[in-house]
Image: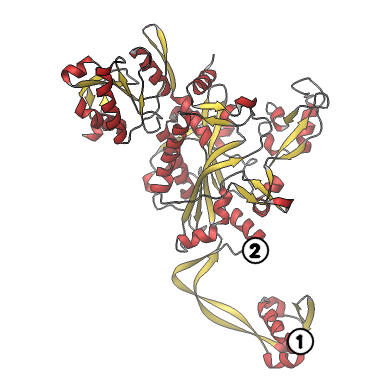
Amino acid sequence: MDKNEKVNELARRRGFLWPAFELYGGAAGFFDYGPLGAPLKRRIEDIWRQFFVIQEGFAEIEAPTIGVEGIYQASGHLSGFSDPLTSCKECKEIYRADHLIKHIVEVPDALTNEEIYRTIQENEIGCPECGGELSTVYEFNLMFKTMIGPGNKMTGYLRPETAQGMFINFPRLLRHFRDSLPFAAVQIGKSYRNEISPRQGVIRLREFTQAEAEIFIDPRDKTHPRFAEIKEIKMKFYSQAAQETGTEEEMTFGEAVERGVVAHQMLAYYVARTYQFLLAVGVSPDKMRFRQHKADEMAHYAADCWDAEVFLDRLGWIEIVGVADRTDFDLKAHAATSKVNLSVFVHYDRPKKRQKIVVKPDFKALGPRFKGKAKAVAEALKALPPEKLQGDKITVLVDGESIEIEPSLVSCETVEEEVRGEEIIPHVIEPSFGIDRILYTVLDHSYYEDAVDGETRAVLRFKPAVAPIEVAVLPLMDREELIVPAKKILEELRIRGLRVDWDTSGSIGRRYRRNDEVGTPYEVTVDYETLELGTVTIRDRDSMQQVRVAIEEVADTLQSLLSGKVKFLEAGTLVVPAKEK
């Protein structure tokens, strides 16, 4: 059994992840989070909020998971959110066509359907199931379609991403932030994609949780005021150039921006914050890199895009976060479709003087000639650019009618005006996090095995901040004289807000192993010395060392351990780390 199988087996057995709908035979691409998986997921989400809501000051919103059709016309999901499929003419099995040529073409996403099919034919690729001939390649839209209300009058779709909720609320968000850039909104919630053949557990789901931030910035200035905080952080960058040689480059974020590896400070800052978040939840830095999209996979509207990728046994490198500069594509698309102005008036530090050509129609002459249409003709003339006023005749369009006017009926004048600002369409920086993939990565990167007393001990070395159980209270034996003081400790720890488990089943060694396996950082054991001396043992999951602590000091000691203010030494004593002294 390889590590992937061991992690999945542990996740099912101990209540982290369960295949959904098992009572009715199940359905691929759906998972339930069990009693340990749900709190693990919530704690990861809460740390994300600490980074992007609390520390960055972004506003969290919650939008419906069903959207009306116009949203996805504007976003491009109706026309472009699809996968290329091919089906076997013999057994009728359906496949992602681009996946069938991954071993032949490095970036099959960049090929057209015709090119994919030609590659299949030229390489004589048949049905993986029966070897039969494959059909021509066709598109399958990944959105779940539904109808809103009775009578099929309004079409709706389950959202394929949370981002659109922030874009269509842009005018209200702009007012919330007092019409000032930059600002950002975030959302954590469910998204839905009708995946063709989800076969990688929670790596590819049909219902999944995203955490996304849409950061609206002034396109004229992509520096970040807090860039100095992260510029010295070193990380593995797998840039477009590095991918040509197959070698990752380790450098600081300051170097990455200076060398042009990352497009600008604003994008680099949020890549760095993403990196810090992933480390905080327990992703291994040795199994993580940030890969830049290649030129042929970069979205046409993106200025730059970086994916956080993690290495998982058997699955290889998997994307878990994308951080992109989406420019002004989204707001322009929604403005065009909705006919609502989504620009921002940006004030200059100092008003600017500029010359302007003003078109001045001769209202006295226009009135008698055009009567009721005179005002409309005059407005049409004022809207014309100066170059259109040249020639023998000037043509304007009024209520669909083309009208010719003599040049003598209009004049131009150059005036100087004071300009206090300008209308701009903000650009968007978007960090997009796949919470389910991050959770599975934390499980995988936390899983270790070691030998204890001739047996193999499986342990999840969760960071205390994400552990679904922080402390287990364990009476040495299931006897009244030990249960009573143990229950008091249990109640005190819960009052302190700690996540505590109670376990009296089996030998103390077996209970230690159970808690190691689910990642509980510390166990409190109540034994007969507790009755005699008023002390209990606190056991450390990773080192398996124990230290005796007075009952009245247990809660404070555990809180200090969980916060990192105090640490275990190998000898089983507690010390304050050097940086805390």
Q: Which corner quadrant holds the C terminus? A: top left
Quarter of the rendering containing residue 199: top right
First in sequence: mark 2 vs mark 1? 2
Q: Amino acid at mark 1?
A: Glu
Name the one closer to the observer, 120 or 148: 148
Distance of mark 2 from mark 1, alpha carbons?
34 Å
SS assignment at label 1? loop
Colour logic = secondary structure
Quarter of the rendering containing residue 520: top left
> Relative to 25, is 426 on the left or the right?
left
- Residue at the front extreme? 480
Q: x and y percent of residue 118 in the render?
A: 79, 32
Up-down relation of residue 101 to residue 420 (above or below): above
Is the residue marked by circle 2 packed among few (<14), some (14-19), or many (20+) residues within 10 Å? few
Q: x and y percent of residue 499 in the render?
A: 36, 31
Q: Which disc number belongs to residue 339?
A: 2
Give me the residue at 69% from left, 33% from top.
196
Q: Which disc number belongs to residue 406?
A: 1
Give me the residue at 66% from left, 77% from top.
383
Q: Which corner quadrant holds the N terminus? A: top right
Q: Which disc number belongs to residue 544?
A: none
